[in-house]
Amino acid sequence: MDDEKLLNELIEQRRNYRNQENYEKADALRKQIENKFNIIIEDSKNGTATYITMDELNKRKKRKRAEETIKRQKQRQQQHNILDLDKLKHIPRTRAVRNRRKQQHIKSQKARFFHFSHFIKANFLNNNDYFKSINKATITLLDICGGSGNLSWELLKDNHQFAIEKKSLRCIVIDPKKINFSLHKSKIILKKCSKIINNKNNNMTHHTMTTTNKVVDGDPRYNDNNNNNNDDEKRYSASNSRNVKKCEKSNQVKEQCNYFMAKGLHPKIQKKLNSMEMKIINNYLNMNIGFQQISSLFNHQFIQSNLSIWNQADVIIGLHPDEATDDIIEMSMKHFKPFICVPCCVFPNKFPNRKLKSSGKTVRQHDELIEYIMEKAREVNLLKHTSNSNKTMVYVVKEQTIDTIPGPCNVAIYGNYYVKEKSF
């Protein structure tokens, strides 16, 4: 009781100091009271002061923490559709639970390839008279900054079901990073090539059996009695080695411009295959499926050095191409090629020359980047050529948001040919 009286007297004394506007003495007295009685004083707006013990303060903190945990558990329940709240409280916090949001983000990023490929086929290629009028059996697509080739994989997965006047697709990935297939994809490729590999192995065994049974008398390679066998064998091996070196040099030049796709298979499957089987898989990917890669950067120098590939290309694709967005859009609009691009990163420090004509600001955000690209599209001469007397083919650049692609970077900018009837 004596302590309570003393505490109340000290609080009243402090209040008098505050009314007299002597705040230095009031603060000094407050520190003395809190250290002596182990309490915390709280001042209200009315001028009255209340005190709380440290035990009560710790209890309040525990209550707040418990309320926050319950809120988080309810949010987790709504996300994963868990019905029992009581069971949710006893779930252990494992690494999988902590990284759940990260795993969901990775799954959504993987799904963007499927949705974007579906958008390209449905809205860009099928519903267009220009691609139906092309006199080609295959439509070639340049997948710029394709990375591991996930987008081109989704495009070519159902290539036999693709119907633009019974035309097939061919994808060429342009990226310095070499493609590495996952274990699942490499197993699918091996299943498709298994029949060809088995037939090739059977033919090779039959060929070796027939050659061993034949004996040539006049050839010194098959006759052991001649004394000049060693000299002839040396000459023969030297000529073969020269031919092999020439073939290797030519293959190295081809591999620089066109990546050997079979090297991208999973290492578990590469161990089971021979060099001949790897070549069969590479030819199958290039010829039958139409899946190729050129390991280089995409810029003006690439087009000058690979004019044949650029002229063969019918559509240019870029899903989050980062630094190559300007080159894709500028070069495709310059040569009037159909393109579709989903820009993502801005890189304001690398591209300080990007400035909006309407306001003069430098481009620093995603919305400003799309405005900058559309301003460039308005400058291009959009009328390309006339195909018939009644119809004109007009090259138009548009923008459209793809709702199925996750994230804020889901605005597609595409240029394509559209048919317009002449007004008489």
Image (cartoon, helix red, strand yellow):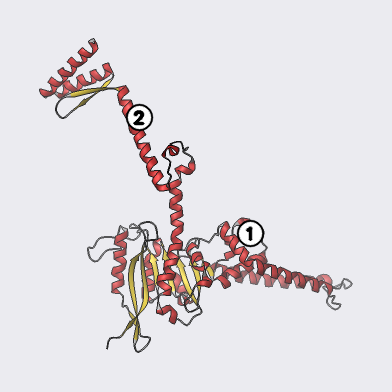
Q: Residues at badges 2 and 1 in contact (C-beta under 8 Å)?
A: no
Q: Which residue is found at the position 38% from the left and 72% from the top?
A: 331
Q: Amino acid at mark 2?
A: Lys
Residue 275 falls left or right of residue 158? right
Query: Crowdedness of circle 2 by 10 Å Cα count: few (<14), some, many (20+)?
Result: few
Number of marks: 2
Name the one closer to the observer, 123 or 284: 123
Q: Which residue is found at the position 43% from the left and 52% from the top?
A: 105
Q: Which residue is found at the position 27% from the left and 21% from the top?
A: 39
- Quarter-wise, where is residue 254 in the image? bottom right
Q: Which residue is mark 1?
A: 270
Can residue 295 be seen?
no
Residue 103 falls left or right of residue 285? left
Q: Where is 371 relative to 389, above or below?
A: above
Position of the N terminus, as image quadrant, is top left
Q: Which residue is mark 2?
A: 62
Query: Residue 355: horizontal and vertical position, in percent?
Result: 27, 63
Q: Amino acid at mark 1?
A: Gln
Can residue 101 be seen?
yes
Name the one closer to the observer, 231 or 25: 25
Question: Which secondary structure, mark 2?
Answer: helix
